[in-house]
Image (spheres, helix red, strand yellow):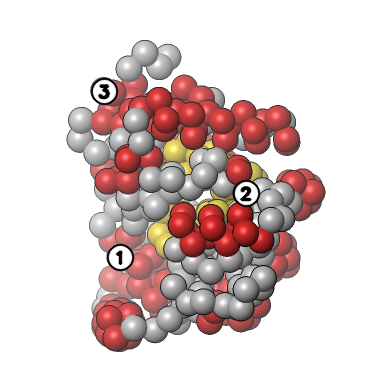
Amino acid sequence: MKKIDNGQYAIKYSQIHSTSIRGALKHIAISGLANYYRLSSQFSKCLSKNRIQFLYMHHIFEDEKKPFRKLIQALIKSHNFISYSEAISRILTGNIDKPYIAVSFDDGFKNSMAAADIMDEFGVKACFFLCGSMIGQTSYSKIEEFCRLRLYKPPIEFLSWDEVEKLLHRGHEIGSHTMNHVELAKLSVEEGKQEIISSFELIMRRIGYVKHFSWPLGRFFHFTPYMAKSVFEAGFESCSSAERGCHINQIAEGKSELLCIRRDLVVVKAPIDHTLYFMARSSRTASINNNQWPEGWREIIQGDLK
């Protein structure tokens, strides 16, 4: 993790990202795979496939604005951007008749406003998943500690509740990313429930409604079926991972608690070809399993839910 001067917040991607030998080799490998895949007959077919692709990011810093705008411009030529709620609805009803994209941002950073400015130029609306305890937080020491211990980043400013309201008024959606961005799999069931329920209640109290939840870190081993059950018991209508994949017209009973959203991480500063490669790969491997929880989770999640 890079260090910046005390009392200052990161405003550029270059302030939070260090290029390691491993990172450089990974970049080269993805570039090679992307170039190879673009030459195959499957590439354009995969990107034009009827599906819902969830793309998520964390931030749009000053040096990410230009590449983010270019990414939206590139994707809007071949995909239809829809809201997060519409995407969930289309999956549950089996109404996926075009290649769709739904966008979301995790953590609730203040630079979400810059992302919204750019998306609004194209009529794109996103869902912003908030860490409840940090919205409106202005104490530098608390922000620095949270970012260092929970996000493994230098200090980054968070949204205020007034800015959250502005996002809503502009047609964007607000979701929960727990109260404190903790790894839920390491908590007791009761502790995990508290993280989930308290975030739901806080957002409900501040803005009146909240439908969507994404869990911190996002892999299945960072979560448990008992935590997933708590998400729906709290009142959320969807639960999202950070497992790569996309969704096609094969649904499991159309019940929201049986649906696990898969999202592809986008590194905005990486070449657009990298994003297209991961999207095409997710499209190529899409199956009914993408809509479902891991084996054995369903019975626990459904439990007494009606």
Point 70% across, 67% down: residue: 114
Q: Which residue occupies the foreground of this view, 284 or 190?
A: 190
From the top left corner, tell me how far across and down residue 260 is, in percent. Answer: 37, 40
Which residue, given by chain and number where applicable, does mark 1 sit on?
Answer: 281
- Name the quadrant containing residue 117: bottom right
Question: Relative to residue 19, is residue 298 drawn left or right?
Answer: left
From the top left corner, tell me how far across and down residue 293 is, in percent. Answer: 29, 37
Which residue, given by chain and number where applicable, does mark 2 sit on?
Answer: 134
Query: What is the C-alpha distance between the residues marked 1 and 3?
Result: 30 Å
Is label 1 in contact with label 3 (beta carbons under 8 Å)? no
Q: Earlier in the sequence, mark 2 or mark 1?
A: 2
Closer mark to the observer between disc 2 and disc 3: 2
Closer mark to the observer between disc 2 and disc 1: 2
Q: Quadrant of the N terminus?
A: bottom left
Res. 299 mark: 3
Q: Amino acid at mark 2?
A: Met
Q: Amino acid at mark 3?
A: Glu
Say few, some or many: other residues with alpha carbon within 10 Å of mark 1 (under 14 / 14 to 19 / 20 or more).
Answer: many
- Name the quadrant containing residue 126: bottom right
